[in-house]
Amino acid sequence: MKKIIIAGILFAFSGSLFAQTPEDALRYSWLSSSGTARVQALGGASGSLGGEISTLFSNPGNLGFYKTGDLVISGGLNINSNKASYYGESNSTGKTSGFFGTSGVVFGNQSRGNRSIKSSAFSIGISKIADFNNSIRFGGLNTRSSMADMFIQNVNADGGDLRTYDTKLAYDVNWIADDANGDLFSSASALARNGGVIQEGTLKTNGGITEIAIGGGMNLNNQVYLGGSVGLPALRYGATRTFDEVDPTTNPNNNFDNAYFDDDLVTKGMGVNVKLGAVFTPSQNFRLGLAVHTPTWYSLTDHYDAEAYANTEGLPQNKGQNEAWSRPDEPSVYDYSLQTPYKLLGSVTYLFGDINSVTSQKGLITADVEYVNHMASKFKAYDQNGIADKNYYRGLNTAIDDAYKGAVNARLGAELKFNTVMARFGGAYYGNPYKNLAGEKGNIYQGTAGVGYRNHGFFIDLGYIYTAKDDVYYPYRLEDKNAFSPAAVKTNGSRVVLTLGFKI
């Protein structure tokens, strides 16, 4: 059993036949809040905010506050700047992209007569809950290991089998080769431990997750507001990775000059989830919200392609040739499912002034606290008849359990109302999802601000979100955590969101 688990973990941390990794699971669960410009200017806090279309995606119990309807459309711009540090060297990159934001329609209905259901609402909305457009570049002198060590380790963990996608390519170009005893070795590995190899790489990503949600809510005696929604997220993730190793000595007689491993991954699919929520009003000015988000069950397809090259300077195993290049005839295509973690959300809002009089309302303060169990993500193959599939996914899910933990996220916002004009500010913190097995640390901090105007059934809101994110990127992993290091990535991002709306 131990051998099976180790093999699965090693496959999971490489560009293997299957291509899924623990990082994929985290990418689809470690998400900051989305929403209209108003909600994002409030730090993303919306769980007990009241009538706001963004709550369709956070706590649909708030839909019960609607007595009339809204038509809303949002859009914006993301600007990211990244700094990656790798073995003492730093590199900076950036990416700018536009997006279609939280939009949709809410139909509200006020009940007549003395009924316990005072009002109800139905809503259809769309929101971009994740944006993967980004770019990082890293490089440095690694004196501890080569990527070739990962290839050799994968083969040894799999009983000498060269079936994995990346390892077969590395073997074909003699980045790893058999010695006289039939054991695998690499001139690049020897060089890394005797002076080091220069390692450089890039990661360029695109795509996102856009969720369509359908839901409704009801108002029970102006004291309890209940709601639910069904979300249908459409996921697309594209990644182009490059990784190069170079001999810094330029010695033509050590059987290694340079090598690279480049790959492309496109993941597409659909998912489904359910959100249930309630808001309680102990007093007119005080609201408490509770919501639960089920896991999202995704059906996904990976298209994976890769190539490898090495110049081994006349290595005998390369039949005296210097260079070799290898690429499969066709990309690998694989279908599988992913279950993301559940979420629990608690919220509180206090409103200032007389909420029954528009001219007497002074503003509000609102907060969300959210728990996400990142280690609950699970991959599963559609067809697990083969022992390779079963072993791989067993090891991959164990690697997720070992790498991640539950995290607490917090969001806080305030709104000041000056008749028809509003000023907003807020902040958010998204907790570290890593168990720190090899120095991993990750946090997201956000500072937000915005303004809004509401009058005669029309509203316009502008929001600004500044994000500071600490994360890590692994070109490869090894069983010995002292033999490799990730690139530490610091991201500074700016997002501008504009929302237009009309009462209907």
Image (cartoon, rainbow, N blue to C red):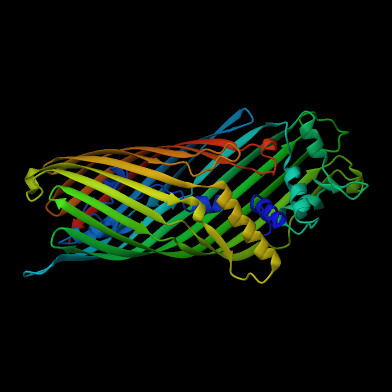
Judged left or right of residue 210, residue 6 is right
> Is residue 22 at all visible to an observer of this figure?
no
Judged left or right of residue 97, residue 268 is right
Q: Return the residue nearer the eye: 459 or 433.
A: 433
Check the image and report above or below for 399 versus 114.
Answer: above
Residue at the location (19% across, 59% down)? 224
Total numbered circles: 0
Check the image and report above or below for 399 versus 335.
Answer: above
- How far from the left and from the top, in percent, is residue 380? 57, 64
Rendered image quadrant of residue 384: bottom right
Check the image and report above or below for 234 versus 415.
Answer: below
- How far from the left and from the top, in percent, is residue 4? 70, 57
> Is residue 431 at all visible to an observer of this figure?
yes
Q: Return the residue nearer the eye: 28 or 437.
A: 437
Residue at the location (77% across, 48% down)? 152
- How far from the left and from the top, in percent, is residue 6? 69, 52
Judged left or right of residue 481, residue 53 is left
From the image, which quarter does the N terminus lie in? bottom right
Rendered image quadrant of residue 200: top right
From the image, which quarter does the C terminus lie in? bottom left
- How far from the left and from the top, in percent, is residue 401? 56, 52
Residue at the location (19% across, 66% down)? 120
